[in-house]
Amino acid sequence: MSHVEAGADAARAAGTPGQPGQPGRPATAIPEHPPGGVLSAPYRALTLGSVSVILLIAFEAMAVGTAMPAAAAQLDGLGLYAFAFAAFFTTSLLGMVLSGQWCDRGGPVAPVVTGIAIFCAGLLLAGGAQTMLMLILGRAGQGFGSGLIIVALYVVVRRAYPDHLRPSALAAFASAWVIPSMVGPVISGTVTERFGWRWVFLGITVLVVLPLLAMLPPMRRAASGPTPGEPPGRFDGRGLRLAGAIAIGAALLQFGGQELRWWSLVPAVIGAALLAPSAVRLLPTGTFRSARGMPSAILLRGLVSASFLSAESFVPLLLVTQRGLSYTQAGLAIAAGGLTWALGSFTQSRPAAEPHRLLLMRVGTVLVPVGVATTPLVLLEAVPVWLPVITLALACYGMGLIISSVGVLVLRFSEPAQVGGNISSLQVCDALANVVTLTVVGSAFAALGGSTAALAEGEGAADAQIAPGAFLVVYVVTTVLALVAIPVAGRLIPRDAAGDGTGSAPGAAPTRTDAADADSDGTTVVRDATGRSTPPGPAPRPGP
């Protein structure tokens, strides 16, 4: 029996406070929320606006890779090609940390609006760039703005939606990446060929304004201002300095890992020296040793994200160079996975799945390594070339079960005044794990005879001679990472959370099976072992 199920059983056995006819327990007020789901009238504008913003950010992230070679060639900036991506990552880390502190201090509305404004300014600067340096500065603005937005929208979910709708809201966020992952590169390539690479940036700018106008009024009503009942905090200068060190260190590590030359060790070593100690200090205590509760939830998402995304990124090159497929055919393997990812997110969002959330996450941590480990079997000529369609679809379903569920748990483990900081840590760990893993497997890939230079040559990449062992090492590393996530998934709830009722995640809200605490609107609610509030029920009648 999972801790979630144990907590639910304990709550049922004891009776649900706040409902009449439960002797021996004081009645507890539970807020009455409007009926319906995330697309019901009270939440429709906020949900559609938030999902649309994430959809456009996701499209830009997926599309820019297709347009960047043409942009770098026209601006005579192929030597600075990597910095266009490193700038986005570096500033997004800073934006994530700043947004977390800003949300805890004054609410998520200002970070969302500011983030969209900076994101649009970055798009305009990149789209109108006359030099590669201007393009890199535009990418930096896009990264900083997206970092502000993503963290703030998670806080909006915590502040504006009742607990039973948060899984659905986060599932909608995850699904917003599906369409861009399937059609983003195709649309970007078409736009680049017919209208020019600049419109890949400029075309999104106008579209971002519309969802902002739709979601701003309900966001102001439901999530503006500091956390109710909490005094506004101060910005943590130390945290921002650590975030800056992590961002610079990650960029140097990524830059140093691009080429196998002796001098590349210098930026790589400096980057690692900046990144490692800063990450230990910035992320919640116990994250890297998988302490129970919040730290393990954050570590789990970093592990599975790094494993799957690093493995997936090499699939097109593998199918093109080893099995002779075109890029369009190879891309279908990834496109199919987007659908099962959305299905996994939908599965975890159903009310009937709530008591089994931890079990679903553990299932996901088994599906991911199975999918990753079996993908390189396509290197064998006797194996059907369509095998990665099945293996990636399997892994994507597991990712759908895990990613949104981790977000749900982090929101539940967080006290209202700490939501921004904890979501910031979640996103930072995710991004860090991805860039470190990609740097490691990319360097190993190149060392064993692999080369990504053929990617810039279009269909000519099919003639590139890449040793199968170069691909094999990528999937060995990513499989090991995915396997490490399995025991971490067993440490998401404190050991005594479903036992004596005293356990709680470090820095988290109480998780007692009979505990009552305040929800985001300041109203007292009852929570089970994972911090899940009991289903909304009638408020107790006032006494005579």
Image (cartoon, grey):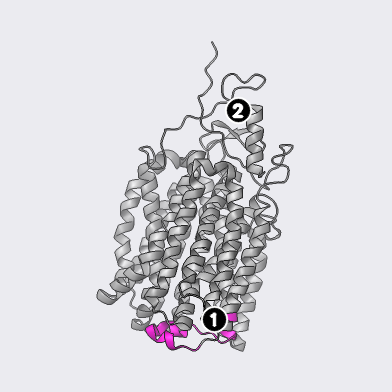
| Label ID, residue 258 | 1
**269 to 28, vertically: above or below:** below
- The x, y position of residue 403, in whole percent, is 53, 55
- The x, y position of residue 428, in whole percent, is 56, 60
* Quadrant of the frame with the C terminus: top right
Q: Secondary structure at mark 1?
A: loop
Nearest the eye: 176 or 388: 388
- Residue at (44%, 85%) from the top-left corner? 454
Q: What secondary structure is the stretch in magenta mostly built from?
A: helix
- Decide which of tag 1 and tag 2 comes sooner along the chain: 2
- Residue annotated with mark 2: 16
Give the residue at the far left of this rendering: 194
- Residue at (68%, 48%) from the top-left corner? 506
Q: Is residue 399 magenta?
A: no
Per the rendered image, the range of residues in magenta is 444-465
Nearest the eye: 265 or 454: 454
